[in-house]
Image (cartoon, coloured by chain):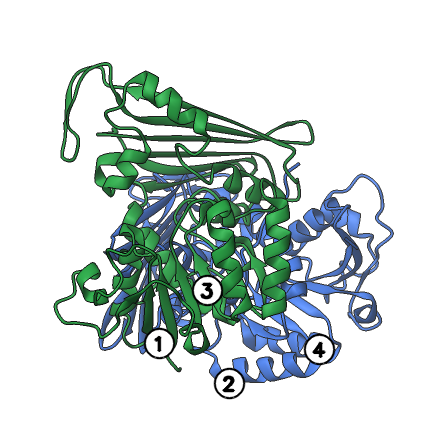
Chain colours: A green, B blue
Amino acid sequence: MRKLKVISFGLGPIGCSIAKLALSRTDQLEVIGAVDANPALVGKDLSELTGGEKPTGITVVNSGRGLYDKADAVLHATSSFLSVAESQLMEFCENGVDVVSTNEELAFPWFNHKESAERLDAAAKKGGVTLLGTGVNPGFVLDVLAITLSGVCANVSEVRATRILDATKRRVPFQKKVGIGLTTGEFEENVKTGKFGHIGLPESIAMVSDTLGSPIEKIEQNIAPKIAEAPIMTEHFGRVEAGRVTGLVQDGKGYSKGRIVARYHIEMYAQAQNPHDEIELFGTPTIKLQITGGTPGDIATAAIIVNSISRVVDSEPGLKTVRDLRPASSVLI
Amino acid sequence: MRKLKVISFGLGPIGCSIAKLALSRTDQLEVIGAVDANPALVGKDLSELTGGEKPTGITVVNSGRGLYDKADAVLHATSSFLSVAESQLMEFCENGVDVVSTNEELAFPWFNHKESAERLDAAAKKGGVTLLGTGVNPGFVLDVLAITLSGVCANVSEVRATRILDATKRRVPFQKKVGIGLTTGEFEENVKTGKFGHIGLPESIAMVSDTLGSPIEKIEQNIAPKIAEAPIMTEHFGRVEAGRVTGLVQDGKGYSKGRIVARYHIEMYAQAQNPHDEIELFGTPTIKLQITGGTPGDIATAAIIVNSISRVVDSEPGLKTVRDLRPASSVLI
């Protein structure tokens, strides 16, 4: 098999993890370019960002133009929001290069971002390009696992998913994202922006319900702070006093046919007890799956992006979601 | 969406469960025929075999000829062995009808039945047909779940899978299959036939290893009896005396690159304690998934066959395995 040529586009912490893993898959992949708009990164050798011992010979540039022609796929990690990412994704479509993206709203844009989804699908088909948004969540735990598990059910009446994770095991931007150290007032202000908490919960709920033949009608979300009952010590934020925020509790309910068909519950806070992922499908039969300790977020995100390259390159063109494609798979070493 | 027209081919206990579920999916499916070679079944209305209250108007016939032209897919449940099923599968290919089959050896025939796999793949492509072998096992727990879980791993060094199930929760032919009530001597004679125990373990191991980029070189299997330490009561076999067989313990080791890459362990016996399915991937990260109580075998098998119809109909022609296709999904009711 020929090696697939990829561009790392977006070099924040997750983008760098993706680039590092892609660089390590020397028998499958060739990283041919690295792109980031941040002037502080442009001009550096990619190894400086990925902790590599030797220079890669790949210099970070601020635009993908000039690289697309040689590439099979772009590994895109710039933003959780389609409002930011759509123009970048359009550029990839116009240049005929397949895309695996961490963009949470791209994972299933057909419910909350239908017009954007239609524009991207049309552009992807016109450019002969496959677009996929994936990651651990959305893209794996709360959607692919639930859909896959449903395969052994004669029917399902309700999908319940729970994800409890210790935020201090994650990268610093993630810890900030869940609000560690904030006052409750600051937390509430953040919630009001609509850009706070786990992005992608509605996408997972809508994907699962739609795939199981019941298009979602309404999703209710609630984001509440988790409050320190006693002071706790954190590596990055130091001492978090009692009464301050240690993270968040996020609930989502999906309605279809006028009733609740999906109940999702996420807790992401510092020093969370009993971290785990759980999918429970009520139906015939009722069945429950658990990932002990939970899916380790940051390395797992890089893994599923890199593991998705071949299935995206092999797919027919269009805006695809993880429900449309064969499972992403790792490599035995 | 138009309803897909299906033929139930093979009407043993599993075939009847499949037919019953397919008949219940009235908004998606239309059962247009029922086929079984057993003269005792031919001529009956399908409802007599599926416990339906009203006649279906579908009379069991002993050949699919005359039905294929109108069908989108055959739901095939006749045998665990390709030596029995290949001629039936060839007939489906010649008649241009897609196939979802419970045949265990069809799940991944590329290792143990390579020539048969090549003949079937060629015939399927010639006939414009998709062939898929699936089920709970092979087809779900010990392969799809392991492959899907690997998607969040940067790499995997070893796959371990465990399945513990209470055989008395399963259909009677299954209980016979695991040897309940036999003497150890009878059990060993059965093992020698090579047709005893769980069929499909090598298929799962080979599929996982091959999908993760390490084609399997050798598989070692061992099947040992589980012996009653004290008398136990079973619904079908009555009292099983101490010293008699209550079921089996089956181990499989897959070798690739000269070392063990997969260790599979199955226990199927009467009144098994702590039934569960577990996949553990050692690697970066190490990750463990468990299905509490295990996947309920017989209804789950019918479900995954019926849930696979649309993905098989949508697939391009050829002999496919579950690693090639999108996840099978159930329906929300």
Q: CA distance from mark 1 to mark 2?
A: 17 Å
What is the three-letter code of the residue carrying label 2?
Glu
Residue type pointed to by label 1: Pro
Spot occupied by residue A304 in the image (x, y as percentages of width and height): 37, 57
Query: In the figure, residue A61 lies in which quadrant?
Result: bottom left
Q: Which residue is found at the position 62% from the left and 55% from the top?
A: A119
Task: Kindly identify which residue carries mark 1.
Answer: B215
Relative vertical location of residue A217 with respect to residue A33 in this rendering, above or below: above
Q: Nearer the viewer, residue A100 or B137?
A: A100
Give the class, few, some or many, for how many residues have Cα within 10 Å of label 3's Cα (few <14, many ≥20).
some
Image coordinates of residue A316 in percent, x first then y, are 58, 69
Query: Residue B322: horizontal and vertical position, in percent?
Result: 51, 63
In the picture of the structure, the residue carrying the numbered disc 3 is: B199
For marks 2 and 3 on the same chain, the one whose residue lies earlier in the sequence: 2
Residue A333 in view in this figure: no
Label 2 to label 3, Cα distance in Å?
19 Å
- Label 2: which secondary element: helix
Label 4, label 3: how many angstroms apart (C-alpha)? Answer: 24 Å
Give the residue pinned by disc 2.
B115
Disc 2 and disc 3 on one polypeptide chain? yes
**On screen, residue A2 above or below B169:** below
Residue drawn at x 14%, y 71% is A54
Identify the residue position indicated by label 4 in the image: B91
Residue B5 bears which disc, if any?
A: none
Q: Secondary structure at mark 4?
A: helix
**What is the spatial separation of the Cα atoms under label 1 and label 3, in whole angstroms?**
20 Å
Q: The residue marked by circle 4 belongs to what chain?
A: B
Sort mark 2 into few (<14), some (14-19) or many (20+) by Cα contacts within 10 Å: few
Earlier along the polypeptide chain: callout 1 or callout 2?
2
Q: Label 4 sits on what residue type?
A: Glu
Q: CA distance from mark 1 to mark 4?
A: 30 Å
